[in-house]
Amino acid sequence: MTAIDVVLLIFAGLMVGFINTLAGGGSIVSLSVLMALGLPPTLANGTNRIAIFIQTLTATSSFRQQKVLDTKKAFHMAVPATIGSVIGAFIAVDINEDLFEKAIGVIMLIMLVFIFYNPKKYIYGNKEIEDKPVTWKTYVIFFFIGIYGGFLHMGVGYFLLTAIVLGAGYDLVKANAIKVFVVLAYVPFSLLVFIYYGEVNWLYGLVLAIGNVIGALVASRLAVSKGVEFVKWVIVIVILLTSGQMFGLYDLKEVFS
């Protein structure tokens, strides 16, 4: 690993930690950088989870310190997501690499639909739903989100935010706090699957994590201090940038290579 590789990984991690904490889809940057540095897609997928775990641990601690995390409900959502993530991870380590990259494009398109569907309801939440207990439907939804998170992880934040806001009634700030808690809960289990199959590069993952931690700390503070509108516009910008990658307007792997 060269000094340039180190700087590139930390810078990428900073962007990913910031984007993932406030919105989602940041892993498109880290996966692109890791693959540009020579890691095959499956190895990059596993390696990325080291940084994601440390990033979400940092963000969860910050949100909890700022008293915006509903730990009880977050735990109920995390359990089915964790079970699903293990299944998804086993699928990911055996998937054909061409199919893996095609799946990224399809998921990005689906994300756009979720983000722009009924935006007012999506952004501000619903207090009436927020006060109700978690339903069996929510458990099922989070189980399937967990499968996707264990499989690819990239963009899982959008699915989690959609489920937490529309299904549990939280606004974007509180939903982000629950989102990072859920990811923190399931990532270690899916990471273990990748470790078992030897699909993790520890050096790259830990260097990447340095940037992720800084980005997560900054983003979690801004989310609470700036509020829902700030988070909304971060999400819009990220969606536009990631959709540009999906439609071939640019290739991040070439940018970072």
Image: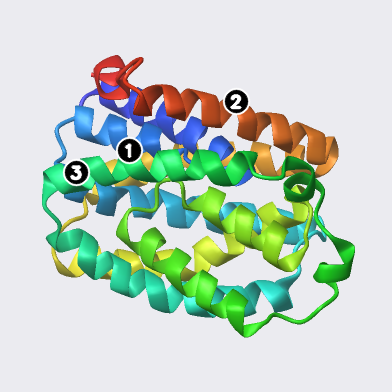
Image quarter (top left, top right, bottom left or bottom right) of the N terminus:
top left
How many marks the image carries: the answer is 3
* Label 2 to label 1: alpha-carbon separation: 18 Å
Image quarter (top left, top right, bottom left or bottom right) of the C terminus:
top left
- Residue under label 2, please give it: 237
Whether residues under marks 2 and 3 lie with C-beta atoms below 8 angstroms apart, the answer is no
Q: Left or right: 210 with respect to 70?
A: left
Tell me if residue 58 can be seen: yes
- Residue under label 3, please give it: 41
**Which residue is painted at 62% across and 54% down in the image?**
162
> In the current view of this chain or complex, which residue is farthest to the right?
128
Image x and y of residue 193, in percent: 24, 69
- Residue under label 1, please give it: 105
Q: Left or right: 228 with respect to 147?
A: right
- The secondary structure type at the circle numbered 3 is helix
* Label 1 to label 3: alpha-carbon separation: 14 Å
Mark number displayed over residue 249: none
Task: Tell me which corner region of the image, top left, top right, bottom left or bottom right, holds residue 67.
Answer: bottom right
- Upstream in sequence: badge 2 or badge 1: 1
The mark closer to the camera, 1 or 3, is: 1
**Which residue is painted at 75% across and 63% down in the image?**
69
Query: Is 156 rendered above or below residue 131?
Result: above
Which sits in the foreground, 22 or 10? 22
Image x and y of residue 214, in percent: 56, 38
Q: Amino acid at mark 1?
A: Gly
Task: Tell me which corner region of the image, top left, top right, bottom left or bottom right, holds residue 138.
Answer: bottom right
- Upstream in sequence: badge 2 or badge 3: 3
